[in-house]
Image (cartoon, coloured by chain):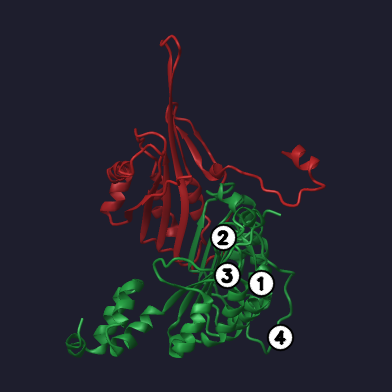
Amino acid sequence: MGKIVGHSSSYLSSQYLKISSFAVRTSYNLSNGLRSHAPPIPLSLSELTSLERLTIHNTILYSSNFWVSSSGEESIEQRYYESALPAIYTLLETLPEGLAPTLQYLILDTCFELKSRLLPEFDWSSLEQAFALPQCSSLKRIELRVSTNLPLHWEPEDGVELMKSLSSDQVLSKLIDKNLLLLEWQGDKTLFF
Amino acid sequence: MNSTLHSSLPPEILDHIFTLIGADSAALTACSQVNPAFSKLAERHLYAHIDVYTRKQPQKYSLSITPSHLAQLLQKSPHIANYIRSSTIIVSNSNAAIQLLFKWALRRDDENEEILGSLFPQLSRLHTVKLTQGAGGTLPWTDLHHQLRSAFIQHLQSSSITELHLYGINDFPLLDLTCCPSLKRLKFAHIYRVHYAGAEDVNDTHPTTLLDTLSIYRCVSGIPDIINWAKSPPSSSIISGLLSLNFRIMTHAHMEYVADALKGCCKTLKFLEFDCGENCGSLVLLLVLPIS
């Protein structure tokens, strides 16, 4: 990239680098249990002493690949997903300490980009842990607003299956029962172009 | 509907019904034609929001009108000007490539823009204005008719406009937004760049803008200038009392400007909304790049 910019520096009037949107997403490899840690969101909330409502738009990407050798003797299944939830949790940790906490509502506008119907168990522990943060002791509720970005050949109804899966998740259902989590279906946002 | 129904219902109830009909301009138009009393009540809702197209467009969901038609309407019924509270102004795109492809269809109408400029002084109750280009791409502010530009700015600075949205309008002069005391909510969306040459000393006798809400959606190169402007003047910045900040970034490098903006309103900010850079490098970028 540096070479490209160097060669074109004399006439380049504007430049945009496409940095992957999953720069702040943690990647979970479900096949081997490995987890890659993403860098934090380059933002600090430490000076926001009046913040009551925080809305974060984020994406959870889930994909699975199944490979079979030509002889049929070997097969490899790869399942992984990426989520910004750990980075969001780290961001919440930057809320002011030592002052009266003010944050009351955390809204996670979460788009699921699904490439497989075989849904995994997503790790929602960050949400549960957020309520335990001293900076978030004023937190009344998390709103998880769910939308989907599905492959074109999928039916929008596949989003309903996702909602069923989320509602029955162990961590999420516990938070829902305690009235700490509101799960909302926002619809499918697949772009056709 | 007949006069019996009207006489049996108090005006407040009818007014509430028309409020519920809301944006259904066809239903409100029909109501306004029942009798003069209905017309008087329904018109307030019918003209509460208008879409003004600088070229002719088919009617969609709200009342859509061209400046010349609006001028005729206000000449015939001047009282309607007081009903207009909100307006979306759709100006034609002058993107070079798009104009080359659709020269006739997208030709801008200077005459209509000039007429629109002359109508602003009549719209004394207007509180929300959305200025947007018509068909994809971006439109340089300087391409608009000079009378529309000067009337628009003058109206912003002297009127009761509290909310301004700019969609796809490039090179908007930010310094002209510095002295708009009524302006509380400001949104920039799909803007490639703005015009800002640095902070100027503001005359003490001139009230400055103090925003409640600032939204920045997918503004490519504009973010640094918008944030720098919003943090000026240093003594009492435009965002020093900000309650709500909402942004969608186009490159991760813009995060540092957002962090900078947070410092400028950290004591007052109550609502913060942003994305994690999910759209960085997305296809939307292609739609807002200028073609020259």
C-beta proximity under 8 Å, tags 2 and 1? no
- Disc 2 to disc 1, C-alpha distance: 31 Å
Per the rendering, the mark at residue B105 is 2
* Residue type (three-letter) at the residue carrying disc 3: Cys
Q: Residue at x 49, y 37 (%)?
A: A27
* Residue type (three-letter) at the residue carrying disc 1: Leu
Q: Chain of mark 3?
A: B
* Residue type (three-letter) at the residue carrying disc 2: Ala
Task: Choose mark 4 or mark 1, whichever is in front.
Answer: 1
Q: Residues within 10 Å of mark 1 (few under 14, many from 20)?
A: some
Residue B211 spot, x, y in % from top left: 56, 75
- Disc 4 to disc 2, C-alpha distance: 45 Å
Tags 3 and 1 both on a single chain = yes
Residue B115 spot, x, y in % from top left: 58, 80
- Under circle 4, the secondary element is loop
Q: Which chain is green?
A: B
C-beta proximity under 8 Å, tags 4 and 2? no
